[in-house]
């Protein structure tokens, strides 16, 4: 069931009408360029033929061919003709597709996405892209009956992903007001509902409600057939996958807003450990899901669960990396993987855990220096801050600055990333001495309190506090079964101790090394070396 506090479908319809009728006021001169003012450009014949072919396959709902067009043909033409320029404006290609408004809406989605990824979007681009998303979702959600449209899963995921990215980009753009012109400020002031947090949440919740994906997943979770609960809309792949991807989208949005509990709550009916889960059909969705689940766990101090999430997806990326190099999203997946290695480095420092050999070797390759510095109290805080800045999502503020306030230009803008960095560092600051304490405890089976206090250069009372903190941190809520928010208190450390009078008694449980993995990994390396030598010998 959806939350009672949000009347999704009705509110969304109202907001769409407002966006299409009243929100876009007559623009200030020099800010808004009307459709009649676009410059005519020469479109290469190969691009014209591509547009016609693209349009025909959209009309025919040829998903297989659309997948090839979307993943390969469009990107090849982009590299050849539009690497540093925008694609032809929608009005310029309208005669080629008989002014088909549905296709033009889909084309605009690609058109604006290209501008965001390759060029610098203007305020006009940001507003018109939002307007186009309103048109697209209005068509999907408010048509009479399910729409006769089928798109590849990859494109459906990218629509949701890009929608959230552009919302995130606009929030950060809106907060930086010092370098804006008077026209831009006036435009933002007059169109305050554009890219509002509430409208974005309404879109995602509306897609979930329309597709009945929550009910479908619940039936599947209990061993039933998803089609039983699908209904008229949910039985169509377009609605089913958009609804499913919207759940992952809400996981991301709530993390960006800093509500990590609600973010994980969105995943109640999605089983991460289930083989052939729907999110695994699109690699980018798979990676995004585990990144935000792991990050939410980390911010909730459930480091063991965060380590498990990051380790799982990084193992998947390593095993399938040969396929990623052929994907147009190769760079994004690689960057997200590097960010997760950084997060994993911090989590392992805060909650020492034995990692998979492959992940451990990759971690040493990428972050060996930072790992060593994290164990040094005098350097640790700075390294934690650097790694967090690099690896955290770019948080957003749901509300922009008050542009009606005459003093707004003199105020320091709220920086969400700095805010959540301070929250994370406040937690870390208490744990700075724990790695050093752990390193001493591993050397002894019994040890006097005074001796340990002298090693750490603190007084005995501070040592007692530190030992108590270490004891508390060694037990965390760990997921066992059920939803992601559920779990049981369990020990997460291989080191345990007790205090009797002024003596510490220490016990360490050691896990035997898995030599099989080591031999298999080195056999594979040896085979790669032999293969390389054979190729060079033939040359």
Image (spheres, grey):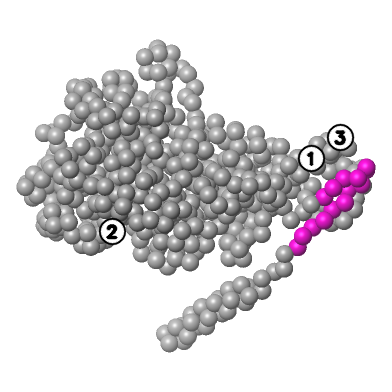
What is the secondary structure assignment of the residue under circle 2? helix
Q: Position of residue 213 (x, y in %)?
A: 34, 47
Residue at the spot 14% in from the left edge and 37% down from the top edge: 38
* 150 drawn magenta: no
Residue under label 2 = 71
How dense is the environment of label 1, judged by Cα within 10 Å: few (below 14), some, or many (20 and up)? Answer: few
Sooner in the amino-acid sequence: mark 1 or mark 3 = 3
Looking at this view, is 383 or 24 the one in front? Answer: 24
In this picture, residue 196 sits left or right of residue 449: left
Question: For residue 41, which quarter of the picture?
Answer: top left
Sooner in the amino-acid sequence: mark 1 or mark 2 = 2
In this picture, residue 160 sits left or right of residue 46: right
Looking at this view, is 377 or 99 the one in front? Answer: 99
Q: Which circle marks residue 458 in the picture?
A: none
In the depicted structure, whether residue 169 falls above or below residue 332:
above
Q: Position of residue 1 (x, y in %)?
A: 39, 38
Q: Position of residue 117 (x, y in %)?
A: 33, 46
Cα–Cα span, label 2 and label 3: 63 Å
Looking at this view, is 487 or 522 the one in front? Answer: 487
Residue at the spot 86% in from the left edge and 34% down from the top edge: 461
Cα–Cα span, label 1 and label 3: 11 Å
Span shown in magenta: 497-510
How dense is the environment of label 3, judged by Cα within 10 Å: few (below 14), some, or many (20 and up)? Answer: few
Residue 50 visible? no
Residue under label 3 = 461
Residue under label 1 = 468
Which mark's residue is nearer the viewer, 2 or 3? 3
How dense is the environment of label 2, judged by Cα within 10 Å: few (below 14), some, or many (20 and up)? Answer: some
Looking at this view, is 488 or 224 the one in front? Answer: 224
Q: Are marks 2 and 3 in contact (CB under 8 Å)?
A: no
């Amino acid at each position: 069931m959806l939350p009672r506090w949000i009347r999704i479908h009705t509110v969304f319809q109202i907001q769409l009408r407002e966006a299409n009728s009243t929100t876009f006021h007559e623009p200030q001169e020099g800010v808004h360029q009307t459709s009649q003012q676009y410059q005519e450009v020469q479109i290469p014949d190969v691009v014209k033929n591509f547009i016609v072919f693209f349009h025909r396959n959209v009309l025919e709902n040829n998903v297989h061919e659309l997948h090839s067009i979307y993943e390969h043909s469009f990107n090849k033409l982009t590299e050849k003709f539009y690497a540093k320029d925008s694609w032809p404006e929608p009005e310029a290609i309208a005669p080629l597709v008989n002014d088909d408004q549905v296709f033009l809406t889909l084309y605009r989605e690609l058109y604006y996405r290209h501008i965001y990824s390759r060029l610098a979007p203007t305020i006009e681009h940001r507003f018109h892209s939002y307007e186009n998303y309103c048109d697209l979702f209005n068509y999907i959600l408010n048509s009479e009956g399910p729409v006769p449209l089928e798109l590849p899963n990859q494109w459906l995921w990218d629509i949701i992903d890009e929608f959230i990215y552009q919302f995130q980009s606009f929030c950060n753009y809106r907060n930086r007001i010092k370098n804006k012109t008077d026209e831009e400020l006036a435009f933002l002031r007059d169109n305050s509902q554009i890219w509002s947090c509430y409208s974005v949440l309404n879109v995602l919740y509306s897609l979930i409600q329309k597709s009945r994906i929550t009910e479908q997943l619940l039936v599947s979770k209990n061993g039933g057939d998803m089609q039983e609960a699908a209904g008229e809309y949910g039985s169509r792949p377009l609605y089913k996958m958009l609804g499913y991807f919207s759940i992952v989208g809400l996981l991301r949005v709530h993390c960006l807003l800093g509500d990590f509990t609600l973010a994980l709550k969105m995943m109640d009916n999605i089983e991460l450990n289930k083989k052939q889960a729907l999110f695994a059909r699109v690699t980018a969705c798979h990676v995004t899901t585990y990144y935000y689940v792991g990050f939410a766990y980390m911010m909730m101090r459930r480091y063991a669960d965060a380590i498990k999430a990051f380790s799982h997806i990084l193992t998947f990326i390593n095993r399938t990396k040969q396929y990623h190099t052929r994907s147009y999203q190769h760079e994004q997946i690689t960057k997200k993987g590097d960010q997760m290695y950084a997060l994993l480095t911090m989590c392992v420092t805060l909650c020492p855990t034995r990692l998979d050999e492959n992940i451990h070797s990759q971690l040493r390759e990428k972050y060996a220096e930072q790992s060593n510095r994290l164990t040094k109290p005098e350097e640790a805080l700075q390294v934690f801050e650097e790694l967090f800045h690099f690896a955290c999502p770019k948080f957003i503020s749901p509300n922009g600055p008050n542009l009606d306030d005459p003093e707004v230009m003199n105020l320091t803008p709220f920086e969400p990333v700095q805010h959540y960095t301070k929250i994370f560092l406040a937690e870390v600051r208490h744990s700075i001495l724990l790695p050093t304490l752990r390193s001493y405890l591993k050397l002894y089976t019994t040890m006097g309190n005074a001796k340990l206090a002298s090693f750490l250069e603190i007084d005995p009372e501070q040592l007692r506090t530190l030992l108590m903190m270490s004891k508390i941190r060694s037990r965390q809520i760990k997921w066992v079964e059920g939803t992601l928010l559920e779990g049981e208190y369990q020990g997460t450390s291989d080191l345990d101790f007790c205090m009797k009078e002024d003596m510490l008694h220490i016990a360490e449980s050691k896990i035997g090394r898995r030599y099989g993995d080591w031999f298999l990994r080195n056999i594979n390396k040896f085979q790669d070396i032999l293969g390389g030598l054979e190729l060079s010998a033939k040359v």
